[in-house]
Image: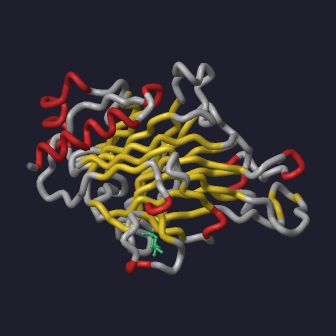
Amino acid sequence: MFSLSLLGLYFLCALSIPTSYAFHLPPLRRVSGSKCSPFWTTFPASAVANAGSGSNSRAPFVGITPPTSYKATGNGLQMFLDRPKWEVTTANGVNDFVGEGSTLNSTFTMLYGRVTWVLSTDAVPGVITAAIFIADKFLGDEIDLEFLGSDPTHWQTNVFAPAPEDTTPLYGVLSSIEDIPQSRNDRRGTITEPHAYTIDWNADRIIWSIDGQPVRQLTPGKALAVIIYALRYSKDLLPGIVEQTGINGALHYPKDPMRIQLGIWDASTPIGTAEWAGGPINWQKVTKRITATIHSITVEC
Ligand SMILES: *[C@@H]1O[C@H](CO)[C@@H](O)[C@H](O)[C@H]1NC(C)=O
């Protein structure tokens, strides 16, 4: 029964994902101790409950920002960033008002699993689009995909797993910038065309992939685990070094159950954020609603 329904899910995915977005990741090794349910959506209206429905909702996603800030079309989830209602003044590298963005949470959490987002977003400098795993506790674990409108030929990956040993948050320490490859429909290789971005997370390693190609892998930092991993998966070993999360004598490896959070936001202030984002947004140049689209989400366990 179980394998039949998985097969069904596989065919559903194979049939419904346009070939231009198709991704071919290796089969998953089921991890003991994982808490994860396979899931797939292209965001029909029923997939998103509006803010306030909270945990009563049976929808897999819930809006945190108002219902006007997103639209579940059945052909993807559109998330909007609108210009501020007031006239914006730019001074000293920041805007005095920020536009309203869009944020949604999954109502489910997962401990380990592989999630693929097919995503595209507008290339407006100062705008950040994010698709992340995030734990519920304050300053908890996070595994991120971030897209900077100012740098449309790249995407950023990041991890936060604060340890008691840290005296300051390790912003940017475990982050990395990756290329967007060309594809049949995206000869320039940019965030404005749909690509399949994957986070594959288990107790041994995190692997980020784009369009089925692994580009980065991070291990907790135990030498033994790295050696075992290398022996078992050597033929799949990624180019470059295997990064580890051991810093200040503590591991910074995510191990809490996490939600999926989706968002688009205005990074036009404060100055450090605006600089990182290539902002602030120049609203004089923005001619339409700034939109990020999550064409589909696939959770494999
Ligand atoms: C969304 O997720 C964050 C991070 O887990 C959590 O702090 C927040 O309470 C969630 N909000 C809703 C409405 O689910």
Q: How many labels does the image show?
A: 0
Figure quadrant, ligand 1: bottom left
Q: In which quarter of the image is residue 68?
A: bottom right
Q: Position of residue 197 (x, y in %)?
A: 44, 39
Residue at the farthest left position: 1
- Give me the residue at 45% from left, 48% from top: 42
Q: Where is residue 119 in the image (x, y as percent from the top left)?
A: 52, 42
Q: Position of residue 245 (x, y in %)?
A: 34, 49
Q: Is residue 60 above or below residue 124?
A: below
- Give me the residue at 80% from left, 59% from top: 94
Q: Where is residue 152 in the image (x, y as percent from the top left)?
A: 64, 35
Near-viewer residue (148 or 3) = 3
The type of colouring in the image is secondary structure
Q: Quadrant of residue 260?
A: bottom left
Near-viewer residue (150 or 167) = 150
Q: In which quarter of the image is residue 120?
A: top right
Left/right of residue 105 with respect to residue 101 in the rendered view = left
Q: Is residue 26 visible?
A: yes
- Give me the residue at 69% from left, 40% from top: 123
Q: In this view, does 89 lie above or below 288?
A: below
- Give me the residue at 56% from left, 63% from top: 103
Left/right of residue 189 with respect to residue 299 in the rendered view = right
Q: Is residue 249 visible?
A: no
